[in-house]
Every structure is written in structure tokens, then in C-alpha cells.
Image (tube, rainbow, N blue to C red):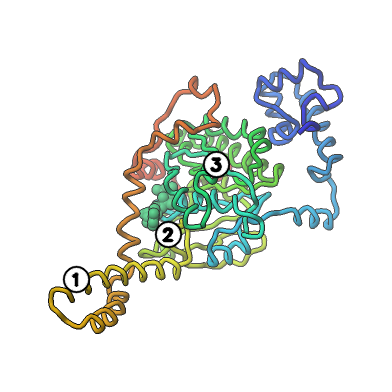
Amino acid sequence: MEDLRLDSLAGVGPVTTKKLADAGIHNIMDLIVRGPVEISDITGMEKDTAEKIVNKAREHLVEGGLISKDFVSASEIYKRRQDIGRITTGTNCLDTLFDGGIETQALTEVYGEFGCGKTQLCLTMCVQVQKSKEEGGLEGGAIYIDTENTFRPERIVSIANANGMDPQKVLDNIIVARAYNSAHQTLILEEVGPLIEENNIKLIIADSAVGLFRAEYLGRGTLSNRQQKLNHFVHLLSRIAETYNCAAIATNQVMASPDVFFGDPTRPIGGNVVAHTSTYRIYFKKSGKKRIARMVDSPHHPEEEVIFALGEAGVMDPEDTEKKTRKTAAKKETKKTTKKTAKSDETPEVSVTETPEVSVTETPEVSVTETPEVSVTETPEVPILETAEVTTDGSSELTTVEAPETLALAEALDEEFSDSELTDV
Ligand SMILES: Nc1ncnc2c1ncn2[C@@H]1O[C@H](COP(=O)(O)OP(=O)(O)OP(=O)(O)O)[C@@H](O)[C@H]1O
Ligand SMILES: [Mg+2]
């Protein structure tokens, strides 16, 4: 956009523009998102100068109607909230929980134990955001910051197919950035502004937001440093969502909390840092083959729970997976009975009509439970590295820290911190 160029600000000449660009600040939005303290830190310019530039940037955006004024009437806030878009989850149950879908201008945190479906929700949303507005999407693309190497294009293809969308087109509208360490993860987010503009991005995902910080900052001594860095990351994510009117999702694992005697003894990692910054917090829990989602913290949703399922289409309504299973089970059974009939010479009418119903109740979830782990564990991890368009030049200079290979390692880390230590910094 022409009027977002840095040199369109009065007093910002080529020298300052270059200084800012060298530090990764490419447009006026970036100035707002990063703020004067950080601008001064990364460019080496005086704090006063940085403040002046950021103030000018803010005035510019207020004039252009892109951000709201410092003092606004409630009705103006109400008007800005009318611009909030919602992305359907493609399920009735989760849409009910989210009151229509995942919102733009907000950070939605999804936390829960391993395998509860956080990544599946993220992958599903990458597809849903691309749907037309009539179908509940925002006709935009997605940026996926993958810190655990769990982005699977194959899952995108099957979710797109299940939604009757062209998988190739859907893949083309997702930009994947593989983050190798927490500094790199933050760097990616700092550089994401121009990509959002150029690619009409409406959804930005950090999966997981906390994992790398947790793996790198070991021991009690580093806790406050970790929380500070994490704080910076989640605030940046939240500000990007607000400034660019896009939705942001951050995932987070849980750790066992030994002080809880009643109810669910798990709590999200990252202490209060993530909690304070996110607008919505959703807790996912496994319950056999089904999953439970609970709205834990929201300024305007009631605290409620819904049951959902995981399947070919990503997150699904439980009845949809049952329907599918029933069909498959019925098909299998029909085949079986036809074979049997051929052998035993029984009248086909009887056996074919009788058996399917028995099989439905006896083997409901078979097809769903048998397939999942294969696709998750077998797919090679290489393609993601190749498509990581956001990866910046500086990445190779940063020290690469291995992501936690096992949950056991990550859990061991958390045991080091007592409850009282997991507070804000
Ligand atoms: N094609 C599929 N069909 C049905 N279910 C699937 C399919 N692929 C994955 N799943 C389900 O999703 C689960 C994994 O969920 P997911 O990867 O979203 O977990 P997560 O919450 O991100 O866990 P982690 O904390 O380890 O990242 C599998 O255990 C399986 O139940
Ligand atoms: Mg995951």
C-alpha cells in the first residue's frame, strides 16, 4: 500500500528509512506494532526520535482510519468491532463455543495435553479461512509458524477435499515458517507485516507458541528471562492481530499441576504471560475418542463446554464422524456378508439387510481410530522446510536449538518450577 510507506511520514527521509528497513521495519504498520522502545533498541536511534516517529505513524494511521484514536467513544469502539471477522471452524459445536467462529483482532489461545487436537484445529482453520464469506470464511490466506515440525500438507489436502475445495489452491494460500529456536520464532513474527499485506493474510498461527521457549530456558535462573521473551512474542502476536484485523491462534501445552486436588490437574505452560495477553482461551481435553473444548476465559462468552471429534475433515462434529464410520462399517459388513452368502448359499436378502445394523453398534469407531497415527508419524518432515517462505536470511546465523523431542523432556523442565514461580514478570 502506497500510503503505508515509511517515507510518506513527514520528517522521515531516505536515511531513516534505510536505518529502519535494515532493522526489519518496512512500513508504518511495523512501527506501530513494534513500538518506540523496541525501535530505538534495534535501530540505535535516540528514544525521543523513535517516539516521535512512532507518534507520527500513529497519527497517520488514525487519519487514514486504519487504527482508532487514543480517546474514543464507546460507539466508535463498537463501530470498529463491527469490522471484526469470524472464521467458521466448519463444525456446529465449536462455532457455538466461539459464538460464530474464531475472531479477528483477537488472540485465541488453545491449550491442552498432547494429541488433544490443537494442531488439527490449526490445520483446519488454515483451510476454513479461505472459504467465501457466505460459507463462513474470510477469503484470505494463513501464515503458520511451525515450531514443532508438525505442519502436514497432507492433512491440508484431506481437509480441503472434505470441504469440496481445490487442495492445490488451498495449499498455495498457506505460508509456512518453520521456527528453529525461540529467537528465530520471534524474528519471523517481527518480519511478518509485509507478508500479511501482500498475501491478504487473515489468520496467523503459532503452533506451539511456548514450546521452544520452554525447551531453551532451563533452570530456575532463566525463568524471568523466559517469561519476558515469551511476553514479547505473545504481545507482538496480539498487536499484529489487532493492527491488521486478522485472527491469531497460539497453541500451548499443559503441565501437571500437583497442587490441584479436585478437578483437572493440568494447567497451561507459560504462567500468566500468555493468559493475560490472549483474548480467548480454550481448553481441549481428551475423552476417549472424543474431545472436549471449554471456553475458559473470555470477555463476553459464557464458560461452556462442547464435545467435538477429530477426523478426515480436521475438527468435526461428533455426529459427522459417526455417520461416516457407520457408512464405512456398513460397507465393510455388506462385503463380508456377500462373501459369506456366496459360500453358504443363503438367501442374500436376509443376510444383507440384517447385518449392517448389528455392525453399527458393535464396531463404531474402527475406521477413524485406525488411520490417524499413520499419517501423523509417517509423513516425512522435509517438505515444510522447503516451503518455509518466511524464513529470513538471518536465520542461519542464529544458534539452532533442538525442539523438545519428547514430552517427557518438556515435562521434566516444568517440574523444576514451583507454582509460585510461574507468575508474570
Ligand atoms: N486423519 C486423521 N483422522 C482422524 N484423526 C486424526 C487424523 N490425523 C490426526 N488425527 C487425530 O489427531 C490427534 C493428534 O492431534 P494433534 O496433532 O492436533 O495434537 P496436539 O494437541 O497438537 O498435540 P501436541 O501437543 O503433541 O502437539 C491424533 O492422536 C489423532 O487422534
Ligand atoms: Mg500439535
Task: Residue 325: tell me if it is visible.
Answer: yes
Amino acid type at circle 2 is Leu
Query: Residue at point 83% right, 27% down?
Result: 9
Query: Residue at point 79% right, 31% down?
Result: 2
Question: CB of residue at label 1: within 8 Å of ligand 1?
Answer: no
Numbered badge on residue 142: none
Which quadrant: the C terminus?
A: top right
The percent position of residue 63, horizontal first and vertical second, equals: 86, 40
Question: CB of residue at label 2: within 8 Å of ligand 1?
Answer: yes
Numbered badge on residue 310: 2
The kind of secondary structure element at disc 2 is strand
Which of the marked residues, 2 or 3, is nearer the chain's N terminus?
3
The percent position of residue 314, horizontal first and vertical second, equals: 46, 56
- Residue hosting label 1: 339
The kind of secondary structure element at disc 1 is helix
Q: Measured along the vertical axis of the image, is residue 400 above or below residue 250?
A: above
Q: Nearer the viewer, mark 1 or mark 3?
A: 1
The CA distance from mark 1 to mark 2 is 32 Å
The CA distance from mark 1 to mark 3 is 46 Å
Which of the marked residues, 1 or 2, is nearer the chain's N terminus?
2
Numbered badge on residue 174: 3
